[in-house]
Amino acid sequence: HTHTLSLMSDRRGGKRRRGGGGEGGRGGGGGGGRGGGKRGYFAAPKRGGLERLRIGVPGIIVTCNDVSRAHSCQRDMQRVFGEFATQFVQPEGTEQAASGNTAAAGDESSPGIEDALQQELASLAAEKKASKTPGTRFAARDTGSKGIMFLETADIPPVEFVQFVLENMEKSRQAGSRYCSRILPVTYSCPADHESIVKGAELLAKQFPDASKTPTKFAVVYKSRNNNTLNREGVIEAVAKAVGADGRHPVDLSDPELCVLVQVLTTVCCMSVVKDYARFRKYNIQQVVDPDGDNQPTAGGGKKELKRKIETEAPKQAGHKKGRIEDEKDNGGSKADDSSPADSATQEKAAAAKAGEQT
């Protein structure tokens, strides 16, 4: 009995000691005991996410056609934009270097030659650095919507840059990413409330030409994601009234000359005025590089390729099925003729026995 009590006390003491070590483990790796550091040891480290989209920052909205590939889409478009940015942005000091070289042709002792060369070398070094890290110029921001990314363009005008990118993609027929759908420039962003959007529309109205001289057909393109506080019809009507100059700029939804983009992303509204919206297929780069849809990503390849497969495979499958049915009929009709000699002898014996019985 005494031995049993001592064992029970030892076990309780061991439990208390292990429990104490566990309490230390919850603190993040402190405390003695066998179980003290297990929880802290196996805990996964926290990763820092993207910064939230800020108000008043210009950039480009990138939509992804596959939410599971959003990260790949982001990296692809950062790379593509980085490559186009080196062509779009004229390196600083190029004009000065050209003027310095021109002066050097007339006078080799011109004092501005060295300065021009230094500026050109500095611009080339900056361009090389930017090409190695293309994502630094187009920093990604969290929009709060799956499959929707925002890439900042601090030193590049987003509308002109997107126009430049689409024109080059239209010529080269290469999108640079199979996961990106649309690229929408953003020149003005504000809180997603009615009053702020109207103020933004009044600022964007300055980008329209004088209505008394050149009336311009326009349309308002509205899209809201993860926001149920705004009235779609009310926002469209208010924006059209702000930029329409009392009706002198007519609304034309079929073939507008300018489009006012209103993109609501959770609590932020992004706006811009763009042109050639119909020409560039609503700024969908996949349709820009492939207007006929031959190479659009589908389960079995392009649309025309899938149609061709259906047209060619269907008759083959029908022919195989018809052939199997005819074979089965032929086999079924010849079963009676393909009887073995043993079966014939058995049938003859049975017939003779039946005739004897009748006799």
Image (cartoon, grey):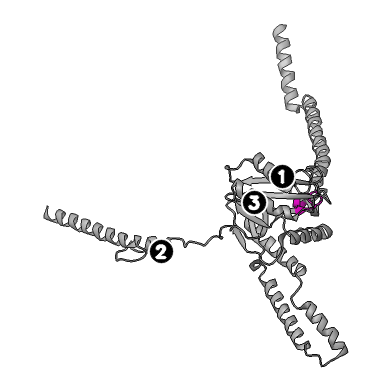
Residue 33 visible somewhere in the drawing: yes
Residue displayed at 71% across by 60% down: 158
Quadrant hosting residue 55: bottom right
Residue 181 in view (yes/no): no
Taking the image as shown, residue 102 lies to the left or right of residue 296, namely: right
**Label 3 CA crowd tier, 10 Å (few <14, some 14–19, many 20+):** some
Q: Which residue is mark 2?
A: 41
Question: Residue 358, percent across and down?
Answer: 71, 7
- Crowd class of label 2 (few under 14; some 14 to 19; many from 20; radius 10 Å): few
SS for callout 1: helix
- Marks 1/2: CA distance? 59 Å
The vertical placement of 237 against 83, above or below, is above
Q: Which residue is mark 1?
A: 240
* Residue 275 is one of the magenta-drawn residues: yes
Q: Residue 250 lies in what quarter of the image?
A: top right
Query: Which residue is tagged 3?
Result: 199
User: Residue at position x 68%, y 43% from top?
Assistant: 236
Q: Secondary structure at mark 3?
A: helix
Amino acid at the residue labelled 2: Tyr
Start-end of magenta stretch: 274-286
Residue 21 picture location, percent across and down: 29, 62
In the image as oriented, which residue stretches furthest toward the front?
212
Query: In terms of sequence position, does the residue under pointer 3 or pointer 2 come before the other?
Result: 2
Q: Secondary structure at mark 2?
A: helix
**Residue 340: image tag:** none
Label located before the other in sequence (1 or 3): 3
With 87 as the anchor, is 27 left or right in this view? left
Q: Looking at the picture, tell me which residue is in the foreground, 18 or 213.
A: 213
The reply to whether the magenta stretch includes residue 129 is no
**Which quarter of the picture shows residue 187?**
bottom right
